[in-house]
Image (tube, helix red, strand yellow):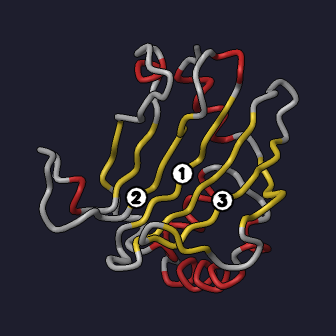
Amino acid sequence: MLTQQQIQMLIALPKTIVEKRPSQGYREENGSRRCDLDLQSGGKDDDGAFTVFVRQNLMFMENFSIGLCYRKTDLGIGKFNLIRYNGPHGERSRSPDGHYAKSHIHRISEQDLASGSTQPQERDRTITDRYATLEEALPVFFRKIAVSNHHQYFPNFSQLQLRLSYEHQ
């Protein structure tokens, strides 16, 4: 299993996007627009595989999810999300902390991985005001997971990132 320190190291490991599917824009599937990314890490000690998924509901654009997935066969579990940035899922919350109605971040924990599940869920969550839309969340997410070349695959968001950086100075 992974320790909390190892999980944080995997998230912070420098990465680059090597493939985006579809290569331009998004595909529509099950009422959402989505794309998937294959990443290459710069970690010498890591032989796992990283991918990113991006999904956005077509009817409720604030409802989106961006996740960093990890797969390493010797862990004995399937692919799992290390960290996931979500927009609000709706006005009403089914949870005491109200996270369904607000932007929030899910993180996998050592306890989640030790649960015995072959597909552990990231139960740790934090409500955030760092983003409100998918366009705002993408650059924040890519900085958090240390992806250096995201602007090549999401050029429109690079302009937004520059504007947001300038406005928050």
Return the residue at label 3: 36
Residue at the right extreme?
44
Q: Secondary structure at mark 3?
A: strand
Task: Please give the name of the residue rendered at 41% of the width and 33% of the height, measured from the top-left corner.
Answer: 121
Residue 145 vs 165, above or below: the answer is above
Task: Please give the name of the residue rendered at 79% of the width and 58% of the height, measured from the top-left corner.
Answer: 17
Report x, y in % for residue 140: 55, 63
Q: Is residue 24 left or right of 62 when viewed as pictured?
A: right
Report x, y in % for residue 138: 56, 67
Q: Nearer the viewer, mark 3 or mark 2?
A: 3
Q: Few, some or many C-alpha atoms within 10 Å of disc 3 (few <14, some 14-19, many ≥20)?
A: some
Q: Amino acid at mark 1?
A: Gly
Instruction: Give the CA separation, mark 1 to mark 3.
Output: 10 Å
Task: Please give the name of the residue rendered at 77% of the width and 72% of the height, measured from the top-left corner.
Answer: 23
Q: Earlier in the sequence, mark 2 or mark 1?
A: 1
Q: Secondary structure at mark 2?
A: strand
